[in-house]
């Protein structure tokens, strides 16, 4: 059956689901999205894999047990997406089509089987979301020209803000996977070495310049062999999907520690991702070309198709007792200079083995104006220009008990492909 | 029984084994060492955990199956050391004592049971060694003052070679775990972006400055919770053991890419470790104080016991058709400015979660003279002063088909605790 189905049918604007909440105009999880996550509810012995649909989650672990998927082997019985991601693009498409069919308003299999439906459809409000995949390794890139220029101005030389290598290399560095956590996990304010410019020696104290980094994380579905490079086209195929990513950063720790080997304790204490992995296939309608790359990239980095994605992004800050959050930034992923495919290609270029579950942060996503920046460092120009919140309070960096909320979605004329949110609340440092 | 045994008895100089080759004066694996590894031989369905003794390996997976260990649960049936390492220090000591007893010349249990002995004792010459543990994450430090000074002189400013932060922070950065390989694995020369100082743009080509970094890797036995710091004393207890580590480096890639976020493709293509993890307990007799730290470290980094180890190290280079290798460096681990315990403490200081199987590279181990340096970059002063090999050929950096051999051991008056070797041969780049 699936051989005859057009791939693009899963994107069709006219598709509707029998899950009614999925058909609402601004619903982040319509039948055209179908992001994957891992959830638990009270009676489950272990977390299950699910797909978001409207206000519900379709329990794929049970759907697979019920024999309703066309994969040959079970991959949704291990409380993480890695076994499924390792199968590759054809399997990803096949499951997407299976799920799209099952949820289609015209398909009676689940729609009219109340007993089965009540078991496999779970209200999101009753579910606890978990890390959707085992993060094998985490690499963070630096692909926004605006962000790299801003940081270069503040930390180094405004006259030569962009390093000479930046226009040639998708600059990145290895991050820490053990502290990648799912949205909703509270984050402890880090302690670290701080040194004021005029101080003789550093002190060890809670960071005073705790910041966000608004990023998109590309999730590697399957890897390459050590010693073998990949093309940008192969890299594109290896990306299973994308998440929102907040790469929390302690700017005062960073500025003192980062030379010559790069950021370390300033970044390793926590990174928050959204619970739903939006598949690359769901984002195909939003594929756009990025900025013109001049100078032309070296041959191994050249692209034969558009590799950016039009994803609207925002950051909100919610103080402890505030009635409402304040939107402090609106930006878009489409303006990134280096694409995720180029970053992945570069990552493997030396012969580095990539693996199922590797997470590649795009780098902070900043536009040209302060209110389109992806870090408070940039929004406030390192604290010089405080932000005023809806409750009248001001912020230069994050204060204790502030909650930071990243959101994102892509939009056609008729439907939205939402990422949901990546939320984190900052708890006071333990040494306070 | 074990409650009455003195811990130090496993270090006793008078201990002898019924495995005769273990009693030879310069044997790296006497009964006082007992390092752990993972090996396979032809008839085994999967790799087993073993302990090196003389020219043999004691098969711990079978010893455990035979009920000869005092641990309550099976941990040696998974072809990696991680389950055992996660048990912590008391279990490590208990198994060390069990094995020491079983191999003791006066113990008849194995010695006189020819049938069992022939099954559990495997000649090292017949075994293939595997990665001894699953490397969760790999972090590389920079703890030799001589090395940091040399690199600072060459890459930056000779007048200010040591960065201002270096004497305060055990500087480190996240590395790549997916390309940590066991000794004997051939390494493909990496390709990367190279830019001559006077060139207008970079090229993409095989590295011309391929180098070693002679390091010791500390293997983390068990971790800490995210958000919780540890003391240097706790860090010491968390270290299961040590391996030799060659952190292969492409110096020409490094110098072009490393600013501002640190080394990336220059380092991620391969790191080679020795197959035997020498336990910290076996190294206790070789614990020494490191250099005086001035300025005094911040309180969280202060140590209440000696935290360095006296380990003699050497590097040999063996060209493709040469009759013999040439020793190109002799140095010692004891001179490192920052200890592994301080590095681990700093790693967790921001709240970073450490995990069983984390590998912490010490940083390149260099002494004060060219022939005690741990990198060819330093030995040849970035290619200025070539090394002459035994066959009359010269080297500035590594050539294709060269084999590099790291060796190390600690020595008392009567016995040696050897690390064996970390060996890697460089194959030509694929694009050649």
Image (cartoon, coloured by chain):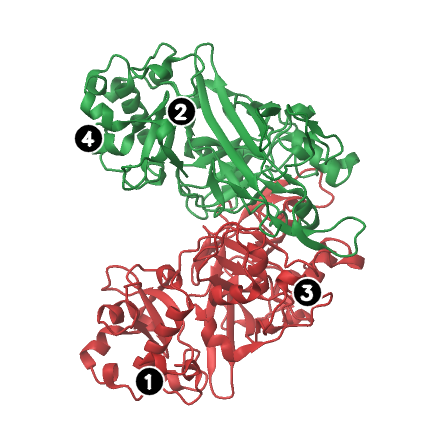
Chain colours: A red, B green
Secondary structure of the residue carrying tag 2 is helix
* Viewport quadrant of the N terminus of chain A: bottom left
Give the Cα distance between marks 4 and 1: 58 Å
Chain name for mark 2: B
Chain name for mark 1: A
Query: Mark 4 sits on what residue?
Result: B66
**Number of residues whose C-alpha sits closer than 10 Å to that of mark 3, classed few (under 14), some (14–19) or many (20 or more):** many
The picture places residue B190, in percent across and down from the top left corner, at 60, 47
Q: Which mark is residue A104?
A: 1
Give the Cα distance between marks 3 and 4: 62 Å
Query: Which quadrant of the figure has residue A140?
Result: bottom right
* Contact, mark 4 vs mark 2 (Cβ under 8 Å): no
The picture places residue A242, in percent across and down from the top left corner, at 48, 67
Q: Which mark is residue A145?
A: 3
Tell me which label, 1 or 3, sits earlier in the chain.
1
Query: Mark 2 sits on what residue?
Result: B281
Residues behind callouts 3 and 2 on a single chain = no
Left of B77 or right of it: where is A200?
right
Secondary structure of the residue carrying tag 4 is loop
Give the Cα distance between marks 1 and 2: 63 Å
- Which of the pair B216/A342 is nearer the observer? A342
Chain name for mark 3: A
* Contact, mark 3 vs mark 4 (Cβ under 8 Å): no
């Amino acid at each position: 059956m699936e051989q005859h189905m057009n791939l693009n049918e899963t994107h069709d604007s006219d598709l509707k689901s029998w899950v009614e909440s999925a058909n609402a105009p601004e619903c982040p999880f319509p039948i055209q999205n179908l992001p994957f996550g891992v959830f638990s509810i009270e009676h489950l012995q272990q977390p299950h894999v699910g797909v978001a649909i409207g206000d519900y989650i379709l329990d794929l672990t049970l759907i697979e047990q019920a024999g309703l998927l066309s994969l040959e082997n079970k991959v949704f019985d291990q409380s993480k997406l890695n076994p499924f991601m390792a199968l590759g693009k054809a399997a990803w498409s096949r499951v997407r089509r299976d799920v799209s069919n099952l949820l289609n308003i015209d398909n009676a299999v689940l729609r009219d089987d109340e007993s089965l439906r009540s078991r496999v459809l779970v209200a999101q409000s009753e579910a606890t979301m978990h890390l959707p995949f085992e993060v094998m390794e985490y690499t963070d890139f630096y692909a926004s020209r605006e962000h790299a220029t801003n940081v270069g101005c503040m930390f180094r030389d405004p006259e030569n803000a962009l390093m000479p290598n930046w226009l040639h290399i998708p600059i990145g560095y290895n991050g820490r996977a053990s502290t990648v956590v799912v949205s909703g996990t509270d984050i402890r304010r880090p302690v670290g070495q701080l040194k004021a410019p005029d101080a003789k020696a550093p002190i060890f104290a809670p960071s005073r310049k705790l910041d966000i980094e608004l990023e998109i994380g590309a999730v590697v579905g399957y890897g390459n062999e050590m010693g073998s490079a990949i093309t940008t086209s192969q890299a594109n195929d290896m990306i299973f999907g994308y998440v929102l990513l907040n790469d929390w950063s302690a700017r005062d720790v960073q500025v003192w520690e980062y030379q010559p080997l790069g950021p370390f304790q300033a970044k390793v204490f926590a990174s928050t991702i959204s619970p739903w992995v939006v598949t690359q296939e769901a984002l195909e309608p939003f594929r756009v070309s990025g900025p013109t790359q001049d100078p032309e990239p070296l041959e191994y980095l050249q692209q034969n198709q558009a590799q950016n994605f039009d994803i609207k992004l925002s950051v909100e800050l919610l103080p402890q007792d505030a009635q409402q959050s304040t939107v402090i930034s609106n930006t878009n992923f489409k303006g990134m200079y280096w694409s995720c495919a180029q970053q992945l290609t570069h990552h493997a270029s030396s012969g580095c083995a990539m693996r199922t579950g590797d997470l590649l942060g795009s780098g902070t996503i900043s536009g040209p104006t302060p209110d389109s920046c992806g870090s408070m460092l940039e929004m406030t120009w390192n604290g010089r220009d405080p932000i005023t919140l809806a409750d009248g309070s001001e912020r230069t960096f994050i204060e204790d008990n502030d909650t930071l909320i990243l959101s994102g979605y892509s939009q056609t004329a008729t439907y939205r492909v939402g990422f949901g949110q990546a939320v984190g609340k900052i708890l006071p440092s333990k040494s306070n």
